[in-house]
């Protein structure tokens, strides 16, 4: 029996960063044994200007796919709890990614660490930020330190706000198989 591919469920911020940086097609090269999933909830958060590039990747039907979120009652209940307007409500996209990964044992791809860190740590969910993807791109010789720094600058100049790191010292300890 063969193990199915690990799914990395991408939030809108990571998608935005990699499209704005012209490197969305780099993600499957970084983790060639993974399937990249975009939930319908997240797709609705992608600006129209960037949506065509995302849909091009999904339509290639290789490493990117789109899935409908909330197929089980447990997922719907947990999603409603996270996005409730009472208390510190979390974003719809982040919440959908985290709940999906919690119930399916997959990996979240989100740079919104303020919203995802506590929940993912509490539920044992691995999550990767844009910088973690860049770390693995450098580790796998797909990108140099200078290219990673340039990528971040391009993304910032195109209107996104990824966290700026010194990639000479940045280390990601999260393991994805």
Image (cartoon, grey):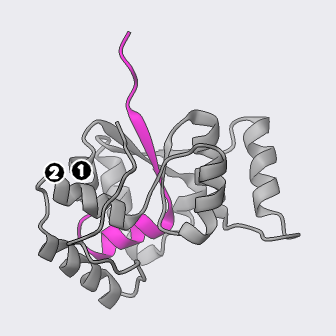
Q: Residue at x 64, y 36 (%)?
A: 103
**Could you say where residue 39 lies in the image, as x and y percent from the top left?**
54, 51
Magenta segment, which residues? Answer: 1-23
Along the viewing direction, whichever of 144 and 5 lies nearer the viewer? 144
Q: Residue at x 27, y 63 (%)?
A: 134
**Could you say where residue 117 lies in the image, as x and y percent from the top left?**
58, 61
Quadrant of the rendering where the N terminus is positioned: top left
Spatial separation of the CA atoms under disc 2 and disc 1: 7 Å
Q: Report the residue marked by disc 1.
A: 30
**2 vs 1, front mark:** 2
Secondary structure of the residue carrying tag 2 is loop
Q: Is residue 176 above or below residue 39?
A: above
**Mark 2: few/some/many CA within 10 Å (<14, 14-19, 20+):** few
Q: Are marks 2 and 1 in contact (CB under 8 Å)?
A: yes
**Could you say where residue 150 lies in the image, as x and y percent from the top left?**
19, 80
Q: Residue at x 69, y 43 (%)?
A: 70
> Is 134 left or right of 8, judged from the image as shown?
left
Q: Is residue 52 above or below residue 36?
A: below
Quadrant of the rendering where the C terminus is positioned: top left
> Is 99 left or right of 63, judged from the image as shown?
right
The answer to whether any part of residue 24 appears in the image is no
Query: Farthest bottom residue?
Result: 157
Q: Report the residue marked by disc 2.
A: 140
Q: Is residue 16 magenta?
A: yes
């Amino acid at each position: 029996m063969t193990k199915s591919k690990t799914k990395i469920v991408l939030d809108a911020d990571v998608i935005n960063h990699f499209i704005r940086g012209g490197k969305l097609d780099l993600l499957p090269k970084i983790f060639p044994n993974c399937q990249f999933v975009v939930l319908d909830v997240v797709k609705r958060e992608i600006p129209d200007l960037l949506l065509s590039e995302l849909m091009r990747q999904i339509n290639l039907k290789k490493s990117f796919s789109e899935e409908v979120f909330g197929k089980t009652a447990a997922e719907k209940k947990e999603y409603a709890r996270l996005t409730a307007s009472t208390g510190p409500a979390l974003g719809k996209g982040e919440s959908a990614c985290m709940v999906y990964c919690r119930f399916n044992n997959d990996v979240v791809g989100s740079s919104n660490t303020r919203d995802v860190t506590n929940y993912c740590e509490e539920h044992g969910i691995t999550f990767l930020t844009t910088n973690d993807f860049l770390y693995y791109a450098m580790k796998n010789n797909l990108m140099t330190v200078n290219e990673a720094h340039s990528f971040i600058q391009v993304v910032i100049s195109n209107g996104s706000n990824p966290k700026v790191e010194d990639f000479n010292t940045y280390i990601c300890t999260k393991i994805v198989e």
